[in-house]
Each structure stands twice: as structure tokens, then as C-alpha cells.
Image (spheres, rainbow, N blue to C red):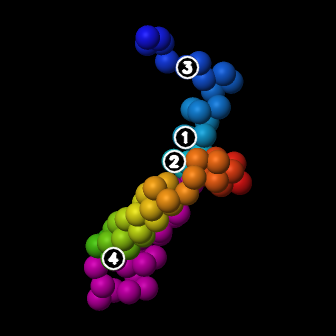
């Protein structure tokens, strides 16, 4: 039994996770940064609550679709889709 973790040559996994994190969080942060604009544009709305609710809903749907895809698609298709 080999308990040594595999080597991450050239930090490929690390950078992949960084890019995935940026891609997932950057769109949300662009709306949050502009919260003053949204508050001024829609003064009678609870903008922070609307933004958070929208983000949670979209994230939930995205994760749900991803989990369905993972459970249905064969391994080779998932790898090819990931490379694209």
C-alpha cells in the first residue's frame, strides 16, 4: 500500500484550482463591488440580499448540473469535457 500522495509536477493542479476559483468568484465579486451603484439605481430594494440570493441560486443550479453530469457521463467524456 503506497501512502505517498502523487507529485504535482509544475503545480498544474494548484494552478487549475486557482483558475477555477477565480472563474467562480470573479463574476460574483464584480456585482458586489458595484453594490453602491445598485443601491443608488434601485433605492427601494434590498440589493445585498438580492445579490446573495441570486448568487446562491445560480451556484446551486451549477453544482447540481455538474453532479448530474458527473453521475451520468462516462469517465472519458468527463475528461474530454474538462480539457475543453
| Label 2 sits on residue | 21
Q: Earlier in the sequence, mark 2 or mark 3?
A: 3
Q: Is residue 46 left or right of residue 5?
A: left
Indicate yes or no whether the magenta region holds residue 60: no
Q: CA distance from mark 4 to mark 2?
A: 22 Å
Q: Quadrant of the N terminus?
A: top left
| Label 3 sits on residue | 6
The numbered disc on residue 50 is: 4
Q: Residues within 10 Å of mark 1 (few under 14, many from 20)?
A: few
Residue at the spot 58% in from the left edge and 47% down from the top edge: 75
Residues shaded magenta: 23-47
Relative to residue 42, is residue 15 depicted above or below? above
Q: Is residue 65 left or right of residue 76?
A: left
Q: How many marks?
A: 4
Front tag of 4 and 3: 3
What element does badge 1 sit on? helix
Amino acid at each position: 500500500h503506497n501512502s505517498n500522495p502523487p507529485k504535482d509536477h509544475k503545480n498544474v493542479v494548484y494552478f487549475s484550482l486557482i483558475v477555477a476559483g477565480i472563474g467562480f468568484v470573479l463574476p460574483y465579486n464584480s456585482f458586489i463591488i458595484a453594490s453602491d451603484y445598485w443601491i443608488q439605481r434601485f433605492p427601494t430594494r434590498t440589493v445585498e440580499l438580492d445579490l446573495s440570493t441570486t448568487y446562491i441560486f445560480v451556484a446551486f443550479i451549477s453544482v447540481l448540473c455538474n453532479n448530474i453530469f458527473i453521475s451520468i457521463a462516462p469517465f472519458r467524456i468527463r475528461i474530454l469535457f474538462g480539457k475543453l
